[in-house]
Image: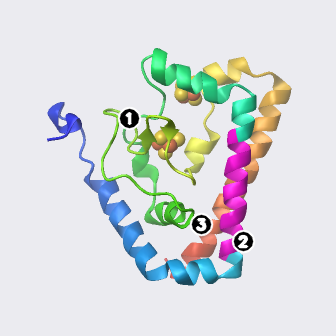
C-alpha cells in the first residue's frame, strides 16, 4: 500500500495508464518521430526554450521562492491531480526529450511528477508553464514579469507546435 492509499487518496491509475500509453507509443514511433526533420527540430527548440525559461526563473528568484515554498512553507503549488491534465502525447514528448517517467508518486499529496528537486518533466503542460502565484506576481516588478512571460510564451508556442506535429504524424 502506498502512503496515498493509506490516507484514502485518489487512485494513481489514470496517470499510470497514460504513462503506459506514452511508453507504448514511444516503443513503436520513436525512430520515426526522431527522424522526421520538422519534429526533431521542434523537439530541439522546445528543449532550448524550456532551458531558457528555467534560467530566467533562476535569475529572477522564482526557483528559489518555489524551493522555499516546498521546503519551509508546507509544500509547493504542484498539487496532486495536476498530473491528470497531461495527455499521452505530452508524456510521449517527455520521453522523446530523454526524460524518464515515474512509476509512482514520490511525494504524497503532490503532483505525480514532482520530485525532491522540483518538476521532473522536460515538457510541462501550459498550465504549469503559465502559472504565476500571487507571491511571485508580488515579488516581480513589471519589467521582470514581462521578461518572464515573453520567455515562457515562446516555450508554450513551441510546445503547441510540437504537440500538433506529433498528433498529425500519429493521426491522433
Ligand atoms: S509558484 Fe508560488 S505557490 Fe507555487 S511553489 Fe512557486 S512560490 Fe510557491
Ligand atoms: S510543474 Fe511539474 S510537478 Fe508541478 S504541477 Fe506541473 S507537472 Fe506537476
CA separation in Å, label 3 and label 1: 25 Å
Say if disc 1 is inside 8 Å of ligand 2: yes
Q: Secondary structure at mark 2?
A: helix
Which residue occupies 39% across, 69% down? 23
Residue 101 shows in the view? yes
Q: Position of residue 75 (x, y in %)?
A: 43, 24
- Residues 47 and 125: in front is 47
Earlier in the chain: of badge 2 and badge 3, it is 2
Q: Secondary structure at mark 3?
A: helix
Q: Position of residue 22 (x, y in %)?
A: 41, 67
- Is the image coloured rainbow, by chain, by secondary structure, or in one colour? rainbow
Residue that numbered label 2 is attached to: 41
Residue that numbered label 3 is attached to: 163
Magenta region: which residues?
A: 39-54
- Which is closer to the viewer, label 3 or label 1? 1
Which residue occupies 41% across, 77% down? 27
- Which is closer to the viewer, label 2 or label 1? 2
- Which is closer to the viewer, label 2 or label 3? 2
Against 103, is 81 above or below?
above
Judge from the rendering whether residue 60 lies leftward or rightward of residue 112; answer left or right. right
- Residues 116 and 167: in front is 116
Answer few, some or many: residues within 10 Å of disc 2's Cα (few below 14, many 20 plus, some between 14 and 19).
Answer: few
Answer few, some or many: residues within 10 Å of disc 1's Cα (few below 14, many 20 plus, some between 14 and 19).
Answer: many
Amino acid at each position: 500500500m502506498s502512503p496515498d492509499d493509506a490516507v484514502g487518496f485518489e487512485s494513481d491509475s489514470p496517470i499510470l495508464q497514460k504513462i503506459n500509453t506514452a511508453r507504448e507509443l514511444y516503443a513503436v514511433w520513436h525512430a520515426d518521430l526522431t527522424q522526421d526533420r520538422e519534429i526533431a527540430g521542434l523537439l530541439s527548440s522546445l528543449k532550448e526554450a524550456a532551458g531558457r525559461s528555467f534560467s530566467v526563473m533562476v535569475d529572477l528568484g522564482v526557483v528559489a521562492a518555489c524551493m522555499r515554498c516546498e521546503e519551509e512553507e508546507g509544500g509547493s503549488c504542484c498539487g496532486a491531480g495536476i498530473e491528470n491534465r497531461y495527455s499521452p502525447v505530452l508524456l510521449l514528448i517527455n520521453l522523446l526529450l530523454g526524460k524518464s517517467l515515474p512509476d509512482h508518486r514520490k511525494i504524497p499529496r503532490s503532483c505525480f511528477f514532482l520530485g525532491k528537486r522540483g518538476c521532473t518533466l522536460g515538457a510541462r503542460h501550459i498550465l504549469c508553464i503559465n502559472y504565476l502565484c500571487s507571491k511571485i506576481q508580488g515579488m516581480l516588478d513589471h519589467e521582470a514579469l514581462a521578461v518572464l512571460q515573453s520567455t515562457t510564451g515562446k516555450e508554450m508556442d513551441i510546445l503547441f507546435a510540437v504537440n500538433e506535429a506529433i498528433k498529425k504524424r500519429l493521426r491522433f
